[in-house]
Image (tube, helix red, strand yellow):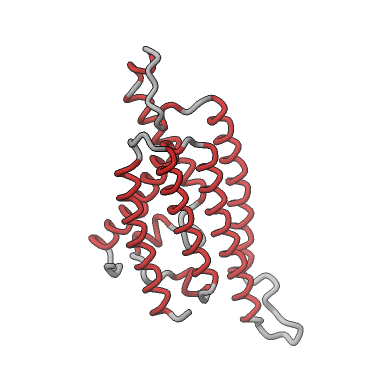
Amino acid sequence: MELEAATRRFHLWFRGLRGLRRDLRSARWADDPAQLRALVGRFVAHMEDYCAARAEMDPVWTLSAPWASPVERGAAYWLAGWRPTTLVHLLYTESGRRFEAQLPDLLLGVQSGNLGDLSPAQLAQIDDLQRRTVAEEDGLSREMAQVQEGHGAVASGGEIDVDGIVERARAVLGRADALRLRTMKRAVEILDPAQAAELLVAAADMEIGFREFGLKYGSGRDD
């Protein structure tokens, strides 16, 4: 996939993200779990499609992300995308914010069904997800560091194996995208439909916010 096609694919994905955020915002407080599940599934599928397209890209373009602003690349990117644990941190942040806001109602036994109502079982599963994801992130960071340091880059004839380096980088980036997807899917499994919708709206807000800030104050290209 050439750079122009990769840039176009990113812009299409980003416009789709905006649309899904709008739909989730409209539906997340509706008393229709089936609709919410369908929208959450569409959101996850949107991520899956983009990761599949990225797998076909030259990993050099994936890492350099010329379609992104310096703000996005410098502040938000880990192995060409957001850290999987960022989603877990966002979940905890949104849960704490909601819990504090509705504490008087909770003390009266009134529950809203949002992220402020996470059960002990859900919290235990989220904690386990965070620990597992941190360990996998650390492993992938070490692997990419070895690639960048040129470990195993010299072929038998003493020449640099450029193709081998590129393929190793592609493999690490593919596993990073796979970890991002697994983390999102597991978080969605743990949460109720309304809670999952709330989390995904917050995740889209973060992604879109970084993009808009970078376009305003950096040199990224607009959609």
Q: Quadrant of residue 90?
A: top left
Residue farthest to the right, as pictured? 156
> What residue appears at the point 53 percent right and 54 percent down from the top-left corner?
181
Residue 104: x percent and y percent?
33, 16
- Is residue 79 found left or right of 194 in the rendered image? right
Q: Nearer the viewer, residue 25 or 36?
A: 36
Residue farthest to the top, as pictured? 108
Residue 15: x percent and y percent?
32, 62
User: Where is 61 relative to 213, above or below?
Assistant: below
> What residue appears at the point 41 percent right and 46 percent down from the top-left corner?
200
Q: Quadrant of residue 208?
A: bottom left
> What residue appears at the point 42 percent right and 74 percent down from the top-left corner?
6
- Is residue 212 found left or right of 46 in the rendered image? left
Residue 188: x percent and y percent?
50, 43
Residue 114: x percent and y percent?
39, 31
Count the marks: how many?
Answer: 0
- Is residue 33 found left or right of 123 in the rendered image? left
Q: Where the C terminus falls, by quadrant?
A: bottom left
- Is residue 122 found left or right of 194 in the rendered image? right
> What residue appears at the point 46 percent right and 40 percent down from the top-left corner?
89
Q: Nearer the viewer, residue 173 or 159?
A: 173
Residue farthest to the left, as pictured? 216
